[in-house]
Image: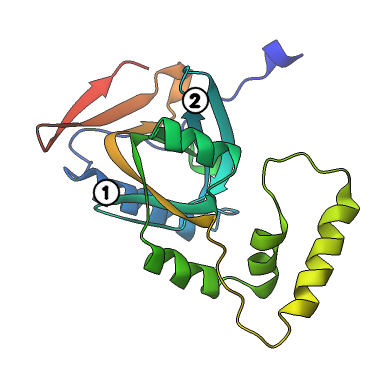
Amino acid sequence: MIQSLRQDYRSAQLSESDINPDPFRQFEKWFGDALSAKLYEPNVMTLATADKSGKPNARIVLLKGFDANGFSFYTNYLSQKGKEMKKNPQACLVFFWAELERQVRIEGKVEKLDKENSETYFHARPTGSQIAAIASPQSQIIENRDFLENKVEELTKSFQDKTIPKPAHWGGYIVKPTAIEFWQGRSSRLHDRIKYDLINGQWQINRLAP
């Protein structure tokens, strides 16, 4: 059954004459297309990390900003991904917009965002999300769901009508790319793949075989 699943991609193409020489501008265009298409959470991305031994791990997170410096997201510093990025500050991001038959893959170095940036974003979040960031010991074993719900109830009462402080273990990261690949699905699996590599401070562009 699984082997018989097939999808022939025919919606668009990607050529060297169409792309922007700046990969961030190219991403901006494609992200804009995803917004215009009203895709469900177009900022969903896979974050892949590895520990010091090279053992890989991946999970879904949300893109919260991008510019010429890189791509940012927020999480618990003490989570599994936080610990892995501290020991091995390299990561890969993957966006897949199925309705547009497009994928973007980003490789780069990970750095923490400054405290001011993290503070600003934390206080822009819904109150429930702020409390959850404090209540949840992310990636740690807990005995049951009641542990979380009781903690949330306790914190909600404690911070009623008060400013909720950003916990020290929570904040932002930025992935600063060294490579960005744009993938456009094409018929018969002859997909278009255009890759930007940062070499000596300049972006070099090459087509890859599908």
Comparing labels 1 and 2, the label whose residue is closer to the camera: 2
Disc 2 designates what residue? 51
Left or right, 139 with reference to 1: left
Task: Give above or below for 198 relative to 112.
Answer: above
Instruction: Give residue 43's position: percent from left, percent from top.
Output: 50, 52
Can residue 42 be seen? no
Query: Which amino acid does the dot numbered 2 rest on?
Result: Asp
Instruction: Give residue 180's position: percent from left, percent from top.
Output: 31, 35
Instruction: Give residue 168's position: percent from left, percent from top.
Output: 53, 60
Q: Earlier in the sequence, mark 1 or mark 2?
A: 1
| SS at badge 2 | loop
Quadrant including the C terminus: top left
Q: Nearer the viewer, residue 14 or 152?
A: 152
Task: Give above or below for 54 relative to 198.
Answer: above
Disc 1 designates what residue? 24
Quadrant including the N terminus: top right
Q: Nearer the viewer, residue 155 or 198?
A: 155
Can residue 24 be seen? yes
| SS at badge 1 | helix
